[in-house]
Every structure is written in structure tokens, then in C-alpha cells.
Amino acid sequence: MDIKGFKEYDIVVIGGGPSGLIAAKAAATGDAKVCLIERGGYLGGCATKSLVIPLMTFHAGEKQIIRGYAEELIEKIKEEGGTIGHIMDPLGVAATVTPVDTEIYKYVAQEYLLDAGVEILYHTEALEVKKEEDSVTCITAKTRSGIYDIKAKYFIDATGDAEIAYLAGCEMKVGREVDGKCQPMTFMFKMDNVDVDKIIDYSDKHPNEFVISNEINSLSEVKRIAISGFFSKVEEANKNNDLNLNRDRVLFFELNRRGEVAINMSRVINKKSIEGFELSEATIEGRRQVIEIYKFLKNYVPGFENSRLLQSADEIGVRESRRIVGEYVITENDIIQGKIFSDTVALGSWPIDIHDPEGKDITIKEMKMGDYYGIPYRCLIPKGIKNLLVTGRAISSTHEAFASVRVSPICMALGQAAGIASKIALLNKLPYKDIEINELMIELKKSNQVIS
């Protein structure tokens, strides 16, 4: 491989999704020279690339459990008119959801990092990891102008697929234990000019057709609606051969602008995003599903008669791929019991939300409103590598626990922990697993993060 040149930093973050961008911000709050490399042309990850919106959830009941740099970023998006903030979840699955304008999100996230002194390298994709003994020395990355080595003292893998840890030879798990199958992928898309009032009126007259929060009597009571229902419409379309998906309901969320919604109905099963060319195959199938769903909504669902297809995702949404085997593996029982660890660095309150890898079903093991759990720092540390942390959805977890920790706000909180841990490791010249955990927890609290 012909290496054209190199760049050198103290800390390199790979992946500009919710966890990576917050990790880069946190790492750059001192004197460290920090770089974030992103294979695309903007930040935000699943929310911006795959339209996985709104963000869910920053709260456990009335308590806001994810604050820090994630909340700071939301406030900056709000200042630019890109969000109405945290609002009640109309479906009652979580305490709140946070609709965001993805275009504003892209811009604000970029400026947020540049203002912090982070160097952003867009259109830069990791190809190879070079190691000396049990440390990563550099990432070999592809750009439009050639191949470069990107060197650093410490690395944070925020790729979502644990790509760097995988290339470094770390032990991995994929999918559920019984057969390795992953949750289905979903091709999200946005529609606008939706008649929200008509949908509310229909839901009020047909309450058995919908799942709504126990806290409300009508969708007219919430700032933005969400729909999980229209079961009879889906059944009717299935019988007429106008809808042929592994889905039993219409699912969508109204966004920052009234009448604009994100549709979460596509379901591509029996594909793995990290195996062969299956991601390409899933993308082809997913785009076909988008048009099928769009036509179904226009023809069958009240309120969508005059709606328009506004935007489909740049990339299919991947719920599940690789995850590392770390110093600790968080489990379903840890989440259900609301366990708080001695090295807790982030909190979560999203339920265990498993979309059946083979069919239509969704298994949701709900948490009581107000309950939450801790995620230990050890889950971010892959075994056998001194200077690599993994943050975001690829942390060390079981398949069941993964179904809770994978959502964007939790990934943001994990990113803050990873970034601050990198600063501490750099300052003390220590392997990640040897940093003083009390120092990390103190620094997290100083930066307004909640860890207990």
C-alpha cells in the first residue's frame, strides 16, 4: 500500500456519530491535539445519515439523566431553530423524545467541534490498523487524494461497528447468541404536508387502533404526535397485496416542523451490515420498501392524502452489528435491575427494544417510568489493547442489553466518558484501563454529566 503521507495527534476519534462527536468535544477541552475522522461529509451518525429521529431519550421520568456536552449541543441546535427541545413521548415508551432538524444538526455539530479545536477530516475512511505489541500506533486511512497514516497516542473507536477494534484483532460478538442473527435494518424516510389534525381526529375516534401513553387521553395534548397503530390499515393493504413487509403497524414521529414526519416502517431481515455485500443488498431492498410504504400511506392512511416524500436516508439504518468483548459485559439483568456500578460513567433509561431478526414482532421489556441503569467504564475497554477505547453502540454487551444501550443519547453520554478518559490517560501516560476511575467520575460531574 503506497502511503502518501501522515498526520499526527494526541487523540484520534474515528466516527462522527453521536458518540464520536461528543467524545471529540470532551477530549479537546484541555490542551490535547484532537482529530476526528469521518468517512462521510457531515456529523451526526444515524440521526443525520439514516434519519433515525427523534433522539430517544435524555430522561428517566422527570429526571434528566443525560446532560453534559450532549445537552449543550441540543441547546445550540435549539438556538438555531433546529429543535423544540425535549418533549413527552406520545407513545409512552420513554419519558421524552427530542425531534431535531437534521440539516441544522449537521451544521451545529460541526461548528461545535471546530470551536473546541478539533480537526475534522471528512471523507476519510479507516482501512487498516497498525500495532506494536498491544498498542495501536496508527490508522491507515483512504482519502480522495490517496492513503495516509494517522498517528496518535490514544484512539477512540466510535464507528458503531467496532471497525477499529475489529481491525486490531479484538474479540467480537455479533447478533444473538443462539444463531448470530442481527436485528433488522430499517430504511427511514421523511414526509411532509401531513394533515396532523386529521390523524388526531381519526385516532380519537378509533382508540383501539393505536398505542399511546397512559399519561394522555388524546394526541391533541402533545406538542408533536407519534403514531404506533393503524393496524387495520396495514392488514387491509396486506390482503390487497399493496404492502408486503414484515411489519404489523404504521410507526412514525412528527418532527421539529409541524406536519413533517419520520417514517419507521421499513424492515430488512436476514442481512448483516458487516458481512460480504449484504449491506448493499439491504440498501437496494430498503429503497424499494420506502416507495412501497410511501404509496401505502398515501392510499390507505387518513392524513397522508396530500403528503409528499421529502427525503429518504442516505444510508439504511443498522440496528445491530459487531460489539466488543470488554473488561465487563453489561447484561439484560443489569438493565432490568437498574444496576449502578462503582465505575458507572453513563446512565440509560431506554427499554430493551428487540426487533425480531426473522419477523414482524417487537419485544419491548419496558422500564418503569423513572427507572434507569448505569453503564460501567469497563464496557468501553476492549481486551488486549492498551490505547484503544470503544464507545457508542459497539460497547461490550449482550444482544439483549445492546437493544437498550444503542440509542443516540446514551451513545452521546458514553462519548463524553470516552473523551474525558482519553484526556486523563494522555495526561498521566497510562493505558486506558489503568486510569483512576474516581478522577474520571469527578471530571464527568464537573462537565455536568449525570452518573448516579
Image (cartoon, rainbow, N blue to C red):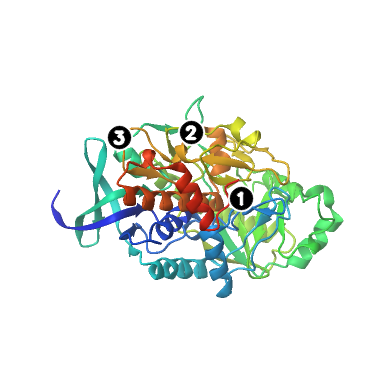
Return the mark for residue 265. Answer: 1
Q: Is residue 285 visible?
A: no
Q: Is residue 50 visible?
A: yes
The span from disc 2 to disc 1 (Cα, nearest Å) is 21 Å
In this rendering, the answer to whether 41 lies above or below 348 is below
Q: Residues within 10 Å of mark 2 (few under 14, many from 20)?
A: many
Q: Determine the secondary structure under disc 3.
A: loop
Q: Residues within 10 Å of mark 1 (few under 14, many from 20)?
A: many
The span from disc 3 to disc 1 (Cα, nearest Å) is 36 Å
In depth, the one of 235 and 62 nearer the eye is 62
Q: Residues within 10 Å of mark 3 (few under 14, many from 20)?
A: some
Return the mark for residue 175. Answer: 2
In depth, the one of 317 and 396 nearer the eye is 396
Judged by depth in the image, the label closer to the viewer, 2 or 1, is: 2
Percent x, y for residue 364? 66, 39
Tag 2–tag 1 contact (CB < 8 Å): no
- Choose the circle earlier in sequence order: 3 or 2: 3
